[in-house]
Image: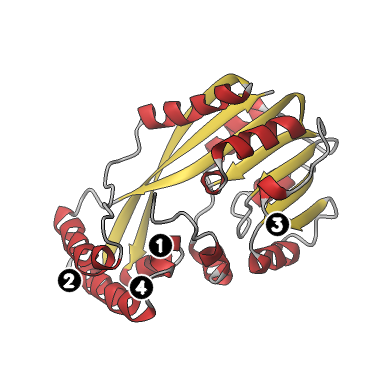
Amino acid sequence: MAVTKGLEWTFDTVASKYDKIRPGYVRELYEKLFSYAPIGPESNVVEVGSGAGQATGPVLQTGCRLTAVEYGKSFAALLREKFAEYPSFSVINGRFEETEFEPDSCDLVFSASAFHWIPEQAGYETAYAMLKKGGAFARFANHPHPDRRRPELTAAIQKQYDEYYYKYYTNKTRDLREYTEEMAKERAMLAGKYGFRDLQYAMFRRERTFTAKEYTELLGTYSDHIALDETVRSEFFAKVEQAITDHGGLITIYDTIDLQLARK
């Protein structure tokens, strides 16, 4: 079982930091999504696991009726405040798989970097049941990769993971592989097991550069890092910051964003 399983609660403890530091998604992704699933003022849309709303705004701007289903109470409150100007926006504070929806009522169900928290079968079957015939499901997620241009920095940070993270989480291996097209395709094809058709996927890339402090602020929004003992986390982050400072003061992360599309 992955370290992150059961740590859904952690994100809600850092809602404001998450809102500040977690990235949104690239314009090209929304162009692809809205080409596949055109939506507008007459559309009924549900977002699964909205978090701080990194993907919510661009969808709301289409004029659709959007319901966000968010497990965290702090995130739910943040969403209501952040998007208060949209009268067609509402928030359900609860788990997606435990929420009752009207069957055949939605034009689009989407989830940004959150659908992996939901049991696979329950997630896909719930989404399928609530979609209208011809309605679309979209899942997308960001997969960061370590700095390619500074291998010495990556090695120095890995040393701190060995010293702190892995001693805390025994039997855990940090996967440093870059997210591949094969991975994106395999994940996209999962929807076919649950009756979806017209399965598609796409990939998008970008770079992000952080100072040492900004980078540990980002790490502080990851569930398994939040759950570290406070003393361990504090020492760990300080050593990571020092490693970045010792190697020029900046770290660049290479993101791959995969988009999964499916139709009922």
Which dot, 1 or 2, sits closer to the camera?
A: 1
Q: Earlier in the sequence, mark 2 or mark 3?
A: 3
Which numbered circle lies on residue 224?
1
Asked if the residue at tag 3 contacts the one at tag 4, i.e. Cβ–Cβ closer than 8 Å, the answer is no
User: Which label lies toward us, 2 or 3?
Assistant: 3
**Residue labelled with disc 3:** 94
- Closest to the observer, 75 or 251: 75
Q: Which residue is mark 4?
A: 213
Q: Are marks 4 and 2 in contact (CB under 8 Å)?
A: no
Cα separation between marks 1 and 2: 26 Å
Q: Residues within 10 Å of mark 2 (few under 14, many from 20)?
A: few
Q: Nearer the viewer, residue 9 or 160?
A: 9
Q: Which residue is identified by label 2?
A: 246
Dividing the picture into quadrants, the one containing residue 243 is: bottom left
Q: Amino acid at mark 2?
A: Asp
User: Residue 151: image x %, image y %?
Assistant: 16, 53
Q: CA distance from mark 4 to mark 2?
A: 13 Å
The amino acid at mark 3 is: Gly
Q: Nearer the viewer, mark 4 or mark 1?
A: 1
Q: Check the image and report above or below for 243 versus 189.
A: below
First in sequence, mark 4 or 1: give its number.
4
Q: Quadrant of residue 196?
A: top right
Q: What is the secondary structure assignment of the residue under circle 3? A: loop
Answer yes or no: is residue 125 visible.
yes
Q: CA distance from mark 3 to mark 1?
A: 22 Å
Quick one: SS at disc 2?
helix
